[in-house]
């Protein structure tokens, strides 16, 4: 079945460091790919998305490129801030097989220290 | 606020009691989803509604769980005879047919003592 794997956390970085969170997926059909973010005490927010191969999603300085050949969607940011501390979830939605339900990875906790 | 709304935000109940949660999706969204999130894990799919029809249920949804969406608008999730293992965050999400992403509510945190 469809699934998402992402790097284990927690990840601790100093402010202004470069961030990469790896994500790979297994899916039938043609999934859309997402990164959701969950700040402490809050609900899930969509951070960025990509709907087809080679698309790049971007938002708030974060980027991720849909790589069909490697089934990956790694999240990157060039310079993290303390306010980026949160849990990041890679996810997919496969319209051909799953009524658009979103399948999530286990999440990666990020802590950014000043 | 026109986002997905969930009520209550927090619920503490004794083992064996029944609880009911409510979700109000974004008004023009005909698709509604329930998820469960335990500590340190990603959300897990529970069930899906298209309008008032419940079209998919996860194996996670035991016989003690029931969900409804009677008029295709708000939805309720009921857990009967709660167990400590039911303690989790219950998330609701909605979107329109053809949309690629879902919008999530703040969740209802259930604690069974």
Image (spheres, coloured by chain):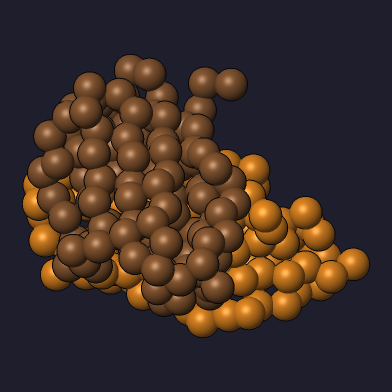
Chain colours: A orange, B brown
| Quarter of the image with the N terminus of chain B in it | top right
Q: Position of residue A56 (x, y in %)?
A: 42, 47
Q: Where is residue B31 in the image (x, y as percent from the top left)?
A: 25, 33
| Quarter of the image with the C terminus of chain B in it | bottom right
Q: Position of residue A112 (x, y in %)?
A: 77, 68
Q: Where is residue B9 in the image (x, y as percent from the top left)?
A: 58, 46
Q: Answer whether residue B108 is visible to the viewer in this image.
A: yes
- At a point 84% along the width and 70% down the height, the residue shown is A113
Horizontal side, residue B88 vs residue B57: left or right? right
Q: Residue furthest top?
A: B28
Choose between A97 and B87: the one closer to the eye: B87
Choose between A103 and A74: the one closer to the eye: A103
Vertical comparison of A96 with B42: above or below:
above
Vertical comparison of B71 with A66: above or below:
above
Query: Residue A67 sits in which quadrant?
Result: bottom left
Vertical comparison of B97 with B102: above or below:
above
Horizontal side, residue B31 vs residue A58: left or right? left
Horizontal side, residue A39 vs residue A33: left or right? right
- At a point 50% along the width and 33% down the height, the residue shown is B5
Q: How many labels does the image show?
A: 0
- At a point 69% along the width and 58% down the height, the residue shown is A40
């Amino acid at each position: 079945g469809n699934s998402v794997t992402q790097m284990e956390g927690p990840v601790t970085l100093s402010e202004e460091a470069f961030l990469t969170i790896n994500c790979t997926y297994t899916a039938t059909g043609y999934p859309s790919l997402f990164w959701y973010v969950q700040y402490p005490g809050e609900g899930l927010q969509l951070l960025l998305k990509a709907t087809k191969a080679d698309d790049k999603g971007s938002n708030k300085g974060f980027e991720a490129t849909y790589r069909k050949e490697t089934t990956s969607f790694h999240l990157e940011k060039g310079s993290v801030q303390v306010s980026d501390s949160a849990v990041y979830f890679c996810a997919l939605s496969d319209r051909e097989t799953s009524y658009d339900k979103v399948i999530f990875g286990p999440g990666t906790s990020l802590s950014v220290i000043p | 606020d026109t986002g997905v709304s969930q009520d209550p935000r927090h619920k503490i109940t004794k083992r064996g009691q029944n609880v009911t949660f409510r979700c109000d999706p974004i008004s023009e969204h005909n698709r509604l989803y329930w998820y469960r999130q335990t500590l340190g894990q990603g959300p897990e799919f529970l069930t899906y509604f298209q309008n008032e029809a419940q079209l998919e249920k996860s194996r996670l949804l035991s016989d003690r769980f029931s969900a409804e969406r009677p008029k295709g608008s708000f939805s309720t999730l009921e857990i009967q005879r709660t167990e400590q293992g039911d303690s989790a965050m219950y998330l609701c999400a909605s979107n329109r047919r053809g949309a690629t992403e879902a919008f999530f509510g703040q969740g209802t945190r259930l604690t069974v003592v």
